[in-house]
Amino acid sequence: MPRLAYVDGRIVPLAAASVGVEDRGLQFADGVYEVCAVLNGRLLDWPAHAARLTHNLGELAIRAPMGDAALAMIARRLIAANRATEALLYIQVTRGSARRDHGFPADTRPTLVMTMRPFDFAQRVAQQARGVAAITVPDERWGRCDVKTTGLLANVLAKQHARESGAFEAWLVAADGTVAEGASTNAWLVDHTGTLVTPALTRRVLPGVMRAAVVEAARDHQIPVVERGFTVAEAQGAAEALITSTTAPVLPVVRIDGVAVGGGVPGPATARLASAVWARIADQTGYRP
Ligand code: PDD
């Protein structure tokens, strides 16, 4: 992949791509983003990502840099320029560049940046067979975790803690003892009656595009879904636990804080959901791992 990026109207080599030091993305994390999967050169679930981006811009009163159709066109141009087959596309929109002042600047143009990097989705197949470990940490994020902002410091620290503990993910535990989500994934369990459980969409949870796809897949496969909170202890004692995201479509969680879940091996409900998601990916993009 040649590693080209899009910055404010131009496709440029990634190494030369830059925004100004007064950009509010840098100064205040005053921006939103999307991470989209590119498989077989095609965008997965584009309408859902575009809709979430537009919604989040609205929540923060950041002007949309352009309409959805123009955004999609640029994304596809960048994918083509990079000759990307399996990759991640990052889209960031910030409130723009202006003299540093907390209040919104008047008449500032939003900054639009897109970057790409190759990504091996097939590596997830082996992880789906083995399962991954999660740790838990207190949720120290702000009050609007439903908005996908670039202000990710608490997520970054949680993920680093997971890495240093040899775990794949850190589950963020709210003050009431329930799991909100992972540092970069949504969190789920399967109870002993075979019901899939995930926290309801409140301000503590990002409405994941993969979360919505998995809810749909579960319904298609007659797996009951309940949206409610659960504690770490409930997840440790559950039949199965799992995480979902664009970059980790369906991954079984087989250890939580060192405690084996479901005998420490991936369970059948998670396996069914994983194959349903691969089928969905194949339908949309033609990609098979
Ligand atoms: N992460 N929760 C959080 C906190 C996330 O950052 C993400 C996505 C998700 C899952 O959302 P989706 O299914 O739309 O990818 C849940 C992206 C991939 C990231 O920041 O890398």
Image (cartoon, rainbow, N blue to C red):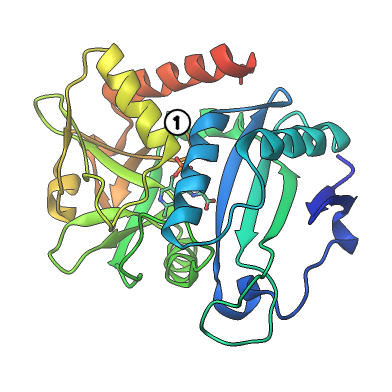
Q: In what quadrant of the picture does the C terminus appear?
A: top right
Q: Is residue 2 above or below residue 130?
A: below
Q: Position of residue 276 (x, y in %)?
A: 41, 17
Res. 41 visible in picture: yes
> What residue is shown at x 66% (from left), y 41% (from top)?
88
Q: Is residue 60 above or below residue 282?
A: below
What is the x, y in percent for residue 48? 48, 33
Circle 1: residue type: Gln
Q: Is residue 218 left or right of residue 183?
A: left
Which percent across, then down, holds residue 179?
Answer: 23, 55
Residue at position x 85%, y 38% in the image: 82
- Give the secondary structure at mark 1: helix
Residue found at the very far front of the displayed protein: 107
Q: Position of residue 112 (x, y in %)?
A: 70, 56
Residue 246 visible in the shown view: no
Within 8 Å of ligand 1, the CB of disc 1?
A: no
**Left or right of 29, for residue 154:** left
- Classify residue 31 by image quadrant: bottom right
The residue under the point 46% across, 71% down is 157
Front residue (pair 24, 171): 24
Residue at mark 1: 128
